[in-house]
Amino acid sequence: MTSGAAERRLGWALCAPAVLAMLVVTAYPILYAFWLSLHHYDLRFPDEQAFVGLRNYASVLSSAVWWQALLNTLIITITSVAVELVLGLALALLMHRTFFARQFVRASILIPYGTITVVAALAWKFAFDPTVGFVNVLFGVDQAWFSERWSAFFVIILTEIWKTTPFMALLLLAGLTLVPQELLKAARVDGASSLQRFFRITLPLMRPVLLVALLFRTLDAFRIFDTVFVQTRGAQETESVSIIGYNALIVRLNLGLGSTVSVLIFVCVIVIGALFIKGFGITLDPRRST
Amino acid sequence: MVSGARTLTGSLLQRSFWGFGSVVAVAYALLPMIWILSLSFKDKRSLTDNRFIPSSISLENYRAIADDPQFSAAIINSLGIGLISTLLAVVLAMFAAYAIVRLDFPGKRLVLLGALSIAMFPPIAIIGPLFNLWRISGLFDTWLGLIIPYMTFTLPLAIWTLSAFFRELPWELDKAARVDGATPFQTFRYVIAPLAIPGVFTSAILVFIFSWNDFLFATALTSTDDARTVPAALAFFTGSSRFEQPTGSIAAASVVVSLPIALMVLLFQRRIIAGLTSGAVKG
Amino acid sequence: MIRVARCRPIGVAALVVLLASCGQGGTDVTPRLQWYVFDEPSGAFDAAAKRCSAAAHGAYRVETASLPASADQQREQLVRRLAAGDRDIDIIGMDVIWTAEFAEAGWILPWPGAWAQSAKQGRLAPTVQSALYEGKLWAVPFTSNTQLLWYRTDRVTEAPDTWDKMIRRAQALGENGTIQVQGERYEGLTVFFVSLLASAGGSVLDEQGQSVSLDARATQEALEIMRRLARSSVTDRMLSTSREDEARLAFEAGESSFMVNYTFVWPSAHSNTPQVAENMGWARWPSVQEGQPSRVAIGGINLGVSAHSRYPEFAFEAALCIASESHQRLAAAQGGLPPTLEALYDDRRVREVFPFADVLRETLKDGVQRPQSPLYSDISLAISRTLHPMTNIDPQADVARLRSAVARSLRSEGLF
């Protein structure tokens, strides 16, 4: 190949456009968001822009709505990711083992992944709707699902789970294929039951993949927006942090206050990421992949 | 792996267990889509009959959306914006992935880590600044205004999957080809490129699915048929009357926009699975 | 026809050539005025646009561009584009509650002297008031709206004139006694509260519109009624998600005997459920205090001119034309939208559509404004958020909660 310096230059040159694009569209706006969060900046009062220090932060953090939304988001995140993990594992095992219409099963599993979130949210919303839906009739109940907080949460979380379990399952499937069959066979010969084999061999070996999948899905669930927007628009105390950020930014056009919410969400994401890396010892070291 | 799995699914009991599981899984995955399909076939009268399977098939809703200029504009916007951002993201990612796999230079870890952190970045955090910048620069409610964020947010995915694919390519072949007298371009054109195409194609599918699916950017950064994409159009679908919920039309539109993706998923199932998992296993 | 150049400046360099999504420069040079307004199904707005284009004799054309059905969504769509300086918006069909916000933000133009005079001419005072901010007129009142009390004449011989009497009457009716009101967390809940509050003699803001009023006695009285409604068996079990249309549908289903709602329910009942319509009576909204007539929040559409319009002069002229007597009559007769011109309430055609024209006019004359503040949308969210769901209202404690929520929204603080 080319000699050192030339190779370095070529490497940088080839990476530059992608890196530049990523920096311009994420790093710069997040800095701008931070700047906005220190200002009174409301597009409805174009003449009143001023530096206000941390006042917007005081305003958001003293607002019951923020804490309510944060709690809601955590409820949605934790419940959906926990259920997805169990369901995802089951699906992964199924895809790993089954020979019954294998291709068809795998293709069907991908349908939720490919479905537009808004479409999924609408489909479930209509399904649970008392006037057009089939769910109430099927289960013989008479429930106005979206007029009460916990039942609305139930549908929102169900939609999330339906839509994203396949992604989880695929990542876990990749982990399953890493488990050496010889090891399982040897354990079987030694008299380990299938449950023992699963918990003592398969699961520990899958741990790295499992944690990466968990981290990805947790952060993804934390930014939930589409489903809540379509199904309740945040009514009945179901709003997520992304919804209140959107309301402040786009509905109220209060960019100062809204950017404060944005920055706080960004901080939450960093904290979650750090917790995973420190707490579970996830390694996201790309060296292994080069 | 295949032979191993075969021995593990030995007994008839086990076979029927996994067979039953497969049926449940397929039902789980398809249920909402079948439901929205059947809803889309109901006419005004039977829309509220609460039946899962329609009693009769009506194309009324499909005719309604075919006549709706909002809907066709949204499809054109979604396709155009999706394809252009896919093209841009994949081309930029190809350069980067090639450099990462084939060249040695300081900072390549940083590129991969940076890409990874952007994959976890919450888009809501930059909606406000982007809205303000787009408002001032005139990018608000334009195709370019969506292409830029879509391209950026899909770059990480594209770079990771492409790096994984490129790593598998038999790059030694180019030496052999050159020994046989081929020019570097010929080597690339006839040896490497054909082998790389499946990987490029896979990451293109994944990137396109992302753009086709996005709702947050689409609702915040557009406002008219000039650039509004399918998800936003569906969520704001007004229908013809002020007080009637256009449920039937929304169902029909949902079916129409889900078909291309469903088809793609069925056709390229293997590739998509490979693409989605490559990063996870090796990363 | 080809549109006049719709090119938007695109700031970022690359790709522009590839993407320039500009419309082609046109050969047709007749200025096109875009009138943004909610989608009016009867076609009365389109007809008005056509007639006003014809009246312009080629000077300009007016075209309607439709907005979503709900006022919240209309505003959300519009403000983003107005903040982005969109030049394609000329005339805006503004909900009465947007005047102060749009004026303060510099998105609409104040009406100059002579035009302002004709815009006020002959119109009901509260409708003109709704288009005023800081002493200037910002829009021409086009259609108005307000709520009446609708009731079943076959079950109730005389309409109750207070909320107390209505609730007791409904309880006596038992199963068929339901009262339909708007209880969802949205603008309609604010309207309900503001109307009750005004009827009790209170107001949300002081007269200057700068600080919180919310007089303790009046506020408590309004909250008592809301709580009593929600806690008794007389409201729908879907109360917490009920909007105007849910209320209408439930009333048409027949099990309800009372409903507070806008006038669209009258033609709707006649076409959907004639057997209900036959027994449908109307009366003024119930009072809070016996002998004190109720004061109900007014709604409706005023026509403003966008500050970014290319043809403001034409837009003023066209807006006046759209809001003129003949088009108000058309909007009333064909679309069921109450006029802002007082004289039209004596018009034969209008009275055919609105047999309740007299009650409607009286209600509108006493109509109350929702707070005329540029922060109205925040204030409204603060109110509806504090009072939802109605079952959890605590009249004593919530006076203080409501005051602090409105005060925070006036300082642009807090989230909704």
Image (cartoon, coloured by chain):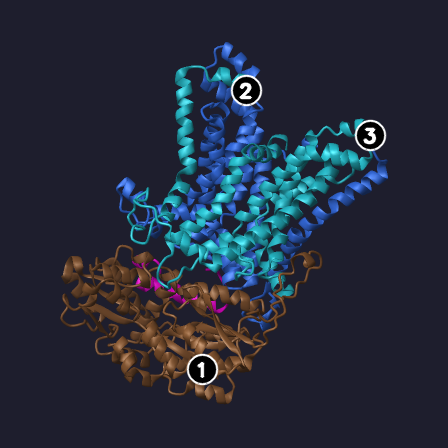
Chain colours: A blue, B cyan, C brown
Q: Chain of mark 3?
A: B
The answer to whether residue C207 shows anywhere in this view is: no
- Residue C339 appears left or right of C164: right
Chain letter of disc 2? B
Q: Which residue lies at the image location 49% right of the left edge and 18% below the top edge?
A: A197
Q: Position of residue B176 (x, y in %)?
A: 80, 26
- The amino acid sitting under disc 1 is Cys
First to last magenta residue range: C388-416
Q: Give how far across and how far down residue C231 sits, in percent.
A: 25, 58
SS at circle 2: helix
Rendered location of residue B207, percent (x, y):
60, 44
Residue at image point 29% right, 44% down: B55
Amino acid type, callout 2: Val
Q: Which mark is residue C321?
A: 1
Q: Disc 1 on helix, strand or loop?
A: helix
Query: Which chain is home to disc 1?
Result: C
**CA–CA distance in space, label 3 to label 2:** 38 Å
Res B178 label: 3
> Badges 3 and 2: C-beta atoms under 8 Å apart?
no
Above or below residue C250? Residue A285 is above
Q: Is residue C109 above or below residue A121?
A: below
Determine the CA span between mark 1 and mark 3. 79 Å
